[in-house]
Amino acid sequence: MKTGPRYKIAKRLGVTVFEKAQTQKFALSAERSAKNKRRGRGRQSEYGKQMLEKQKVRVTYGLPERQFRNYVRKSLETVQTKKPTERLHELLELRLDNIVWRLGLAKTRRGARQMVAHGHVLVSGKKSRVPSQIISIGEIIAVREGSKEHGVLVGFAERFAERPLPSWLSWNPKTMEGAVTALPTTASADVAGDLGAVLSFYTR
């Protein structure tokens, strides 16, 4: 997926979606850019707002357009007992790479994708190299035995202590394994953007 210069993308979307942009210097620069844009532009159209939200969510999770569109399609086909926005949130949060990041095993979602792709993670006892694998309630996520001392996990204890564990996940630091204990909701996991606007963009 070609994303272009990351600082420019992060400034345009108004979020620190990339690790290199997660600094105070970048935040100040982005704030100045946002003020200049507001002065030089008129009111943004509804379509423009929806497109911005779509890009914000897609880039935050690091997904190509086609894959993201498929998640939207699945969420719109969901049963009537569940809101499409909640279903879309579930699909994004239950990706294996996102869960690895939520657990603090990687500093960023991008790092989590690499960690999975390199075979450091087990799902219910089997190695998985598929970052997009959707994890179900009860499935066990663990670090492969041979990877527990790997450099990729340097500083994990500090990261785990600093990052609050979502209520829908569990983790045992002694055995280095955890599980999905419930479905993530927009209340139990921070939302990357306005999912309602995202769905409206694709259903115009």
Image (tube, helix red, strand yellow):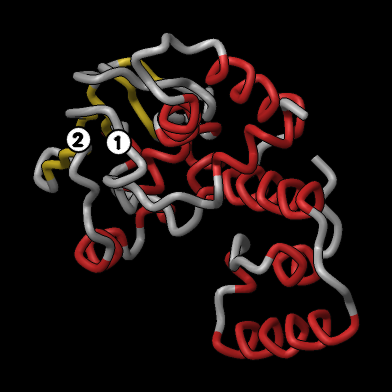
Occupied quadrant, residue 35: bottom right
Residue 177: give its label.
2
Tag 1, which secondary structure?
strand
Do the residues under discs 1 and 2 have CB atoms within 8 angstroms?
yes
Q: Nearer the viewer, residue 11 or 23?
A: 11
Vertical placement of residue 176 versus 91, above or below = below
Kindly identify the residue that appears in the image at 55 percent across and 88 percent down: 24
Residue 143: give its label.
1
Occupied quadrant, residue 98: top left
Vertical placement of residue 46 versus 18, above or below = above
User: Looking at the figure, which quarter contains the C terminus?
Assistant: top right
In the image, 28: left or right of 112?
right
**Gap in Å between the C-alphas at discs 1 and 2?**
6 Å
Vertical placement of residue 49 versus 30, above or below = above
The picture places residue 136, in percent across and down from the top left corner, at 31, 18
- Tell me the mark number nearer the camera, choosing from 1 and 2: 2
The picture places residue 185, in percent across and down from the top left corner, at 32, 37
Amino acid type of the residue that numbered disc 2 sits on in the rendered structure: Glu
Kindly identify the residue that appears in the image at 21 percent across and 28 percent down: 182
Q: Which class describes the residues within 10 Å of circle 1: few (<14), some (14-19), or many (20+)?
A: many
Kindly identify the residue that appears in the image at 32 percent across and 21 percent down: 123
